Image (cartoon, rainbow, N blue to C red):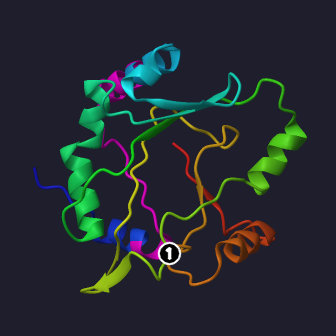
Amino acid sequence: MSVSLTPSQRFHFDAYGYVLLKNILSASEVNQLKDALYRMKADPNRDQKRVYAHPQGDHHILMGNLVEYDPALLAYAAHPKLVALVEEVVGGSVRLEESEAIINCRKPDIDDQTLASRQKHPTGFHRGATPTWGCYEEEGKHHCLFVKTLAYLTDVGPDDGGTCVIPGSHRIRRKKEAVINAAIDDPTENLIHQILR
């Protein structure tokens, strides 16, 4: 199975540090993943299966070490389409370092003002790698030795939270805090991209 980014998708990744790909997973794969994750969330013995979980109330849970829990989760981590795309970005063979999932829904008691504030000032920005570590240029392409694949298994709209990125921050040689503050303070609100599905 030959899978690769189109020239425009690759340019988008090089420029912004991410690329949104639609319909990589089949509806059946999405349903199997959702079933496995909701089963894991409800499983009182999940820690005996080496899964760690960090719940934050009823509206948010982060779970990790997923691939040993259910074959569908291993199949996602080793999905031939995704592995091929990641190897293209990395520039060679890859290995799995981490497998995590978040089940998240909006707090039922969140008010509109708080929601609007969170949209303009998201929290939790972090870098997996910096331009001076783990990144290199070869044949006119930007490569990062640390890449994440994220899959939305449900629709995510502007009021639902979701992943935000600071486009181009993977290439900016400034301290993380300076990049985050510049993006949050931008009056045009163009320096933070919310990834929606």
From the viewer's side, name the closer residue of 67 and 163.
Answer: 67
Single out the residue that lies furthest toward the left: 1
Residue matched to label 1: 130
Viewed as shown, does residue 11 lie left or right of 55? left
The x, y position of residue 177, in whole percent, is 71, 72
Q: Which residues are magenta?
A: 14-35
Single out the residue that lies furthest toward the front: 48
As drawn, 128 above or below 169: above
Task: Name the quadrant containing residue 61.
Answer: top right
* Residue 24 is a magenta residue: yes
Q: Residue at 18% x, 55% y: name it.
A: 3
Number of callouts:
1
As drawn, 31 above or below 86: above
Q: Residue at 60% x, 44% y: name it.
A: 162
Q: Amino acid at mark 1?
A: Thr
Q: Residue at 34% x, 25% y: name it.
A: 69
As drawn, 145 above or below 23: below
The x, y position of residue 72, in whole percent, is 28, 27
Viewed as shown, does residue 93 lie left or right of 41? left
Label 1 crowding class (10 Å Cα cut-off): few <14, some 14-19, many 20+? some
From the viewer's side, name the closer residue of 183 and 180.
Answer: 180
Residue 103 shows in this picture: no
* Residue 196 is a magenta residue: no
